[in-house]
Image: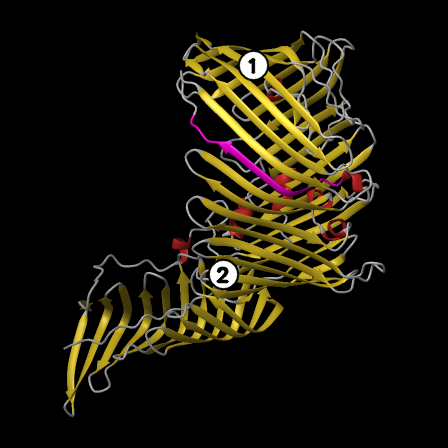
Amino acid sequence: MKYPWFPLIILGFYTQANSENAALCQAMDSFMPVRPNSQIYQDDSYHLSSNQADIREIKGIKHYLFKGDVLLQYQQRTVRSDQVTYQEDTALLTAEGNVTLWDKQLITQGKKVNIRSDRTGEAFDMQYWLPKRRGHGEALHAERLNEDQIKLKETRYTTCDPNEETWRLQSKTVDLDFKEELGIARDATLHIKDVPVFYLPYISFPLSDKRKSGFLMPSGGYSKTRGFEITTPYYLNLAPNYDATLTPRLMTNRGLMLNSEFRYLTETSNGKIINEYLPNDREETDQNKRYFWQVKNTTKFNPQWTGELYYNKTSDSRYFEHFGTTPEINNITHLEQRADLKFQNNLLRFTGRAQRYQSLLEDLNAKPYERLPQLLAETVQTKRNNQLYFQSNAEYVHFNRDDKEAINGKRSNFTGAVSYPFKKLAGFFEPKLRVDYTNYSLDSQTNENRFLYSATADGGLFFERTLDFNDSSLLQTLEPRLFYLYRPYKDQKNIPIYDSAETDFSFSQMFRDNRFSGIDRLSDENRIATSITTRFLGQETGEEYVKASIGQIYYFEKPQVTLPTQTRFITDHNSDLLEEVSFRLSKDFTFSQNLQWNYQQKEIVKSSVALTYQPKGQNTVINLAHRLRKDLPEKMNQTDSSWFLPVTNYLRVLGRWNYSLENSKHLETFAGFEYESCCWAIRLVGRRYLQNAQNDYSNGIYLQFEFKGLAGTGKTTNTFLKQSIPGFHSPLEESIRR
């Protein structure tokens, strides 16, 4: 006798895989039927066993009856039931009584299953489990139409434990197409406990990770400037290598905005185009049409030539203040518009650039100069020990800005340098000579030329010793460093400032060969920088437990070159003293402190202190910090505390308090909680932060809600939480992301 093929009956919903947390979730295995230990067949072989077999022939037609712990195995499927019958003329196999089917993707259990030789069949009053997705539910009737299609009726689905069913999705019908990897549910209702809360007449969903077109879950929130808002994204899977997302954004205070994002990837290019458009802003009378454009593109013409385009444009200067969701976005002052053509081989790197900016500030003098064009070329060479190392770069750029105070013109610059690096285990030494020639061809004043040379010598030593303790040992290092720099003085007051600025005084700046960024100012220098660093490292692991550094600059001659807007001047032969310390108080506590000390006035110029508690392997972090700066036009004196703490296995609290002691202002304050159970999770955050320099505040409420294994909804808070809480990492975000 040849038994018919046993069809696979599958019930599935689109689910987001989530990690199983033993503290939250009962193991899926604890309420799934256990699969018998049996042979898994990979071909057309089969196995059938039972306690009793009865074969009868009625009118020339054989009828087969198997009773008592019937076990049928075919390919990777196993069926167990109380009774199996097979009728030869109809080729119909029927399993009845405690029927359980095991498959690599799901497990089903019901009263009766019919199986036909054409690989169709049906099941009645069934329960099902999806082990890989932690989903389970019930269906009144399931019909396999062919090898790839199944139709389900009166279904319910959840990822909650059977004895704690917080939510479920009920549908009249569900059509599953495994060839197209697509599912369609009709007349579906989401129930919280036993209360229906959301109705969907039609919803489609993927049966795999393959992308498909359709609505994504909506999100919502509230802010002072926008009111209540809701977004409903629609995803368009246009082709395997490009897609788009259209997102209507309804704001009760301002109107309906349409956001769109188009992404593409070809053999030579990749990029995206973003557009946000609000045709009629109810809150604005002068500028009621609001929009934002962003274009990013990278094209690789061949292994050596690459083109890049980065373009941003907005309708008005207050766009990000009104529609941004973080202080960083709200305080954007300039939008870059740039096109690059780049070349690189083993000897040369070249960039051709056209660059301009849209300024969002009222002061046009604060707008950066346009570079139309800028040509950059530099040599590429690997630095090798005990060998001469040559560097050179050249630049030509045309600067332009449309305002009366601008000094438009062209700048040409050449820089060449030669050094000889010498490195040993005990230390290093590297002398270097550099020459700079710059020509300014200016539209409104006399042309300027500048030729300068500089010489540097950078050297350091490494000492180490072993410190033995009762059960461990540490390696202590001592690392002194000297850096000498000489460049003669040249009057540069007539040279305009295009791209130079005063750099912040720090350890890294001490060992640079120019106090200014850019090349419009080359500082006159005759100085020596000294520093000494000590570290305590684990002898076996190399883990750093303590690092302490102190450094200072001694000026043989006081520098004279300055910027017109410079705020910090060198008035003494000794610079301020710099000090940095970081160490681990224990395996969970870390401490860091930076200090700039003016020994003449005997006061702190700049300092930052931070204490962090973050146990390894736990989703817990507490940050306490204080920042002080007196070298800014407006003194900064701030405290900053943030935290992310578990209260129970289910509940976590989070928050931040950033406060200005100088101005008695709350810069950013938020607090909230996360609650995560086995099958659902919620995050609620209330936030208030300083929106602009006019001391306007923005208030917001962010809510995320997720039904694990189904979908999530709400306004994402992950970006600003990571920015505001150093070390923030939430298991809820891992679940949402997957």
- The location of residue 478, given as percent across then percent down, is 50, 9
| Residue 547 located left or right of residue 292 | left
What secondary structure prevails in the magenta region? strand
Residue 386 among those drawn in magenta: no
| Residue 291 located left or right of residue 159 | right
* The magenta segment: 367-382
Residue tagged 1 = 456
| Residue 262 located left or right of residue 407 | left
Residue 372 among those drawn in magenta: yes
The residue positioned 30% from the left and 73% from the top of the image is: 7
Q: Amino acid at mark 2?
A: Tyr
- The location of residue 618, given as percent across then percent down, is 52, 36
Q: Tell me: residue 21, above or below residue 466.
A: below
- The location of residue 253, given as percent across then percent down, is 79, 60
- Asked if labels 2 and 1 touch by Cβ distance under 8 angstroms, the answer is no
What is the number of callouts on the image?
2
Residue tagged 2 = 242
Quadrant where the N terminus lies? bottom left
Q: Amino acid at mark 1?
A: Thr
SS under mark 2: strand
C-alpha separation, residue under disc 1 versus residue under disc 2: 52 Å
Front one among 87 and 370: 370
Front one among 619 and 646: 619
Name the image quarter holding residue 208.
bottom left
